[in-house]
Amino acid sequence: MSKKNLATSTIQISGPIPGPRAQAILDRRDASTVRGLYRSCPIVAESASGATVTDVDGNVFIDLAGGIGALNAGHCPPEVTKAIHDQADKLIHLCNIVGTYESMVQLNEKLHEIVPIRGLKKTLLCNSGVEAGENAVKIARYATGRQGIIVFEGAFHGRSLLGMTMTSKYDLYKRGFGPFASEVYRVPFPYEYREKPNGMSTDDFCELRINDLKKAFVAQIDPTSVAAVIIEPVQGEGGFIPAPPAYIRALRELTAQHGILLASDEVQSGFGRTGKMFAIEHTPGCGTEWDVDMVIMAKSIGSGLPIAAVTGKAEVMDKPHVGGLGSTFGGNPVACAGAVATIDYMRENNLADRANEIGSITLDYFRRWQAKHHAIGDVRCAGAMCALEFVKDRKTKEPNSVLPPLIVEEAFQRGVIMIRAGLYGSCLRLLAPLVISDSQLHEAMQALESAIDAAVLRAKTA
């Protein structure tokens, strides 16, 4: 617990944190909330705006976690909160199984404008990323008459039974929760930093990984039994690992060859985060020369409201029988209104372009820190989807899972909220709201640099 005051242009820390009011609420949380719900930082938020969070003791923090990627448009953008209030004053719930309301239709139409799929599109609205992913699987299985689903090492697709099955990280997310769903198969992801042999080109590495999938068609499941391949173009929980465009194109060609649907999971990488509206668009020709069959969306679609979607080719999405899809709260009127306003806000304020600016500034800091600390093995930014990967030895690349939690702790004491990631828990991920100002970003980076220095020293003396 910090005992010093800290006041910079944005960050305002007065006295120990967590403060007395926050600590009292944290004690109540511990007494009332299940132990299995993880908490990254001991912050008790009272309000938030843009890229800052104010706690119940009046301390002001810069947020580099962004609600785990749900706040690309920032905390409480006025245009979005107004749309939410206006809708809530008129209609909070009906259920789109019972009837129709315009905000649902508006959101569907808005998604069809931005999702990079050619031709007619249809959308199913859901409540969360895992629900959207499960519905994508249901639709793919119905549309193809096949059952097999192929996912990737390092993937994260949620904590439901099927979501856990498709998720790669075992100990944290899956231990003790089996047995898991059937007909889910896993292949290696094109993780260049850890797995590309020295001297091998990116194109050759992509071919190597495509051959792994071809081998799976022999060793694990016949391609005629595969309904869909689901890929995160930039793995989120896996550590912000981008799939090279050459791999995405080869994957599309191979899946099309075998009549397999391809779904892009954009739950964490979508809505401007990577410098384009969707990460899949970094592969040239997406939406014009080629496309995926479905896009899975959640998180930043609604500025923090529980809403998600699957948008796909109409001939695929319309295959399931009437009544086979839906949920009570999926596409809630208030959440839809917030999502429509969020998309408008992102487009009007060019937040995808802003993501590239944030990433450029951040990467400059990362490279300087990497030169100073041998524990930083890799640095990477896909737009404003930025990660530091820590190692015990740069030559062996043995993961260092000790430093990231220490850095999160030290950063919090300096007024910065952040989280870690990675298959081995060896990465720090930055998901700053895309409305963060340059001055706030520099302030947060300076605090984070101090936090890394302190954590490295603690680890050496422990």
Image: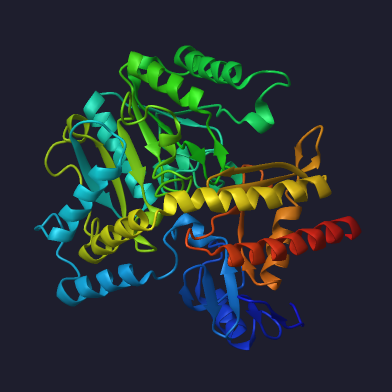
Q: Position of residue 278 (x, y in %)?
A: 40, 42
Residue 55 sits in quarter? bottom right
Q: Quadrant of the C terminus?
A: bottom right
Drawn side of residue 102 relative to residue 289, left or right: left
Q: Quadrant of the N terminus?
A: bottom right
Residue 307 sits in quarter? bottom left
Q: Is residue 370 placed above or below 346 in the rendered structure?
A: above
Q: Position of residue 412 (x, y in %)?
A: 67, 69
Drawn side of residue 346 relative to residue 168, left or right: left
Q: Is residue 200 placed above or below 125 in the rendered structure?
A: above
Comparing 35 with 285, the one in front is: 285
Drawn side of residue 198 relative to residue 229, left or right: right
Q: Can residue 190 be seen in this view?
A: yes
Q: Where is residue 79 in the image (x, y as percent from the top left)?
A: 31, 69
Q: Position of residue 426 (x, y in %)?
A: 69, 47
Q: Which residue is drawn at 28% across and 37% down?
A: 138
Q: Is residue 179 visible?
A: no
Residue ranking furthest to the right: 461
Comparing 35 with 216, the one in front is: 216
